[in-house]
Amino acid sequence: MASPPPEIRGVFTAMNTGPFIISVDDWQLLLNMQAGQTSRCFIEDIVHYKCTEGKEHEFLRLQISHPAGPWKAFVFCDRTVNTSNDNRDPVQSHRAALLCSSSTPSFGNFPAMDIIYAASANSTALKELYLGRFSDKHTHVRTLTYNTKGAQPSVLDVAMLLKVTSCHAPLYRIYENQCYWFSDTVYDTLAHLFPDHRTSTNTHKGGTYRSVDVPMADSVEKVCAAYCSERSAAEERAKEERRQQEAALKAEREQGREQGLELGREQGRAEVQADLKAEREQGREQGLEQGLELGREQGRAEVQAAFAAWQSELLTRMEELEARARPTAASN
């Protein structure tokens, strides 16, 4: 049995949990917080699907590689509508969109809900998605395949594109910016921005309902421009962040250098003082030894001198006694 993929929140789920569901806006924020990993999760293909029953809903499915091994994940990109203007269940919102699809253009007053569903390949989450949210019979309309290393968009690139597309048309307008428009715009913009791909198409045509073209806005050029602008702004933000980090690091280095110099000076002074103290103590010891030796020599010299003086004095007295004794002997 193959080992499960290391989890990357928002892309690779655990094998026995449900799908990861998040809005396009929050998805980009989440992936940016894990940029070290998600910037190396690359898109292998993007499939444009169309439901063949009901309101013929359309959505996109991405196949994504894992940076640490052969594992795959699938991310579904889906536009629905929030008729209650709250954060209700995306599945319920999708049903509301289908029920309201025959309404007038005033339906555009409702905000769109652009949702991401993520699941690892062969996981419980993926089965749940195919049995639940994407259980309607569907077929692929067309596929972009990216095989060339270094030319594949990352999941971060797609997250930015989805956010830009969503911001370009935040309202669900049934005659302009519905699910057909969302899938078509993201797919065509991705093909334009990352042209090193292989394309395959099916006989089914997207953007239609019962084989009749559905009106939708032509936004690829504007979304491309908005994506490039946002990417440039993101790169500038990243550069500025790096500059700030480098400046902070330089300041910390300078502060550390000054602290190190001061500490070194203090240690140097302490070492010199310790050396001087040791030298003084050694000098005192040497001086004491020398003083003792000199004192002993002086003491011996003084004793010898005193003894010599005593001897001299004794001899002198003896001579004096002998001298006095000679006349007495002569007179006798």
Image (cartoon, grey):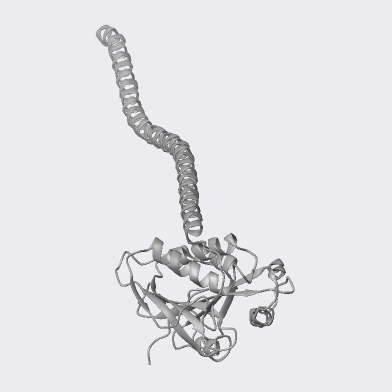
Residue 150 position in % (x across, y down): 31, 64
Quadrant of the image containing the C terminus: top left
Residue at 49% in and 70% down:
184
Residue situated in front as seen by the camera: 188 or 30: 188
Residue 144 placement, left or right of 56: left
Residue 111 placement, left or right of 203: right
Residue 256 position in % (x across, y down): 47, 42
Residue at 73% in and 70% down:
85
User: Can you name the residue that lies furthest to the right here?
Assistant: 84
Residue situated in front as seen by the camera: 308 or 276: 276
Residue 200 position in % (x across, y down): 35, 77
Residue 275 position in % (x across, y down): 39, 36
Residue at 63% in and 72% down:
174
Whether residue 35 is visible here, answered yes or no, is yes
Residue situated in front as seen by the camera: 119 or 312: 119
Q: How many marks?
A: 0
Residue situated in front as seen by the camera: 16 or 178: 178
Quadrant of the image containing the N terminus: bottom left
